[in-house]
Image (cartoon, helix red, strand yellow):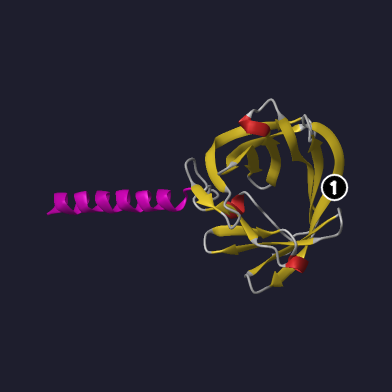
Amino acid sequence: MKRILVIFAILLIGLFAFNCGEKKKPTGPDLEDPNYYYPVNLDYKWTYVHLDIGCVEGDSFVITAIGRNHRSEGTGWDLVSSVGGDTSFRYQLGDTIFYENNVTYFSPSYKILIRPVKTGTFWKDAFDFEYSIVGFEDLYSYIAGMTYQGCAKIRRTRTGDSRVKYLWWAPQYGRVKEVEYADGDTLNCLQGEELKRLDKTQINP
């Protein structure tokens, strides 16, 4: 009987230690959540640089998050560009993040990121563009002077269009680079954009 009690006590101690160990396990970010790759908050400001033909650095422009809004499409963030002052709208329905270029003209929304953010994920948008996540990579930006770690690399194509666009979305930064190539030739850059800086000037959950 004494031996049984000792064994029982040992089992209880082991179970308790296991449970404690489980509770102490760190919980990291959800790497398949599109919000992890497109963070938005009040007064976030992205400064981009245009990439002209040949991916030559051009003028810069700013996109600023000015607040949350409720529209017929859903609830999301109004974003204002320093070029023309147009207001765009970033919102989420279910596991999909949408982007509407100009709310004044009620332009159709792009599906820009969907769950799961992992290699092989595929989707189409209202413009018949086809997107696929082709992998993850670290992207060095000489414009920003830094390396963006673990970027989701997305390939965008459309039937009948020889142009191919690649987009890089970095965790906690958003879209850090996009480049459009003629005939899929990565040596023939038509245009693009690259993030120079992200200012997170206010946190307002």
Q: Residue furthest front?
A: 160
Image-based side of 160 in relation to 58, left or right: left
Q: Residue at x 36, y 49 (%)?
A: 18
User: Residue at left 71%, top 71%?
Assistant: 69
> Residue 23, percent across and down?
44, 53
Q: Is residue 141 left or right of residue 4?
A: right
Nearer to the camera, 53 or 62: 53
The secondary structure making up most of the magenta span is helix
Q: Is residue 101 above or below residue 55?
A: below
Residue type (three-letter) at the residue carrying disc 1: Phe
| Magenta highlight range | 1-27
Between residue 11 and residue 5, name the one nearer to us.
Answer: 11
Instruction: Indicate whether residue 10 is drawn in magenta.
Output: yes
Front residue of 95/17: it is 95
Residue pointed to by mark 1: 61
Quadrant position of residue 179: top right
| Quadrant in which the N terminus appears | bottom left
Circle 1 sits in a helix, a strand or a loop, which is it? Answer: strand
Give how far across and how far down residue 166 sits, in percent.
63, 38
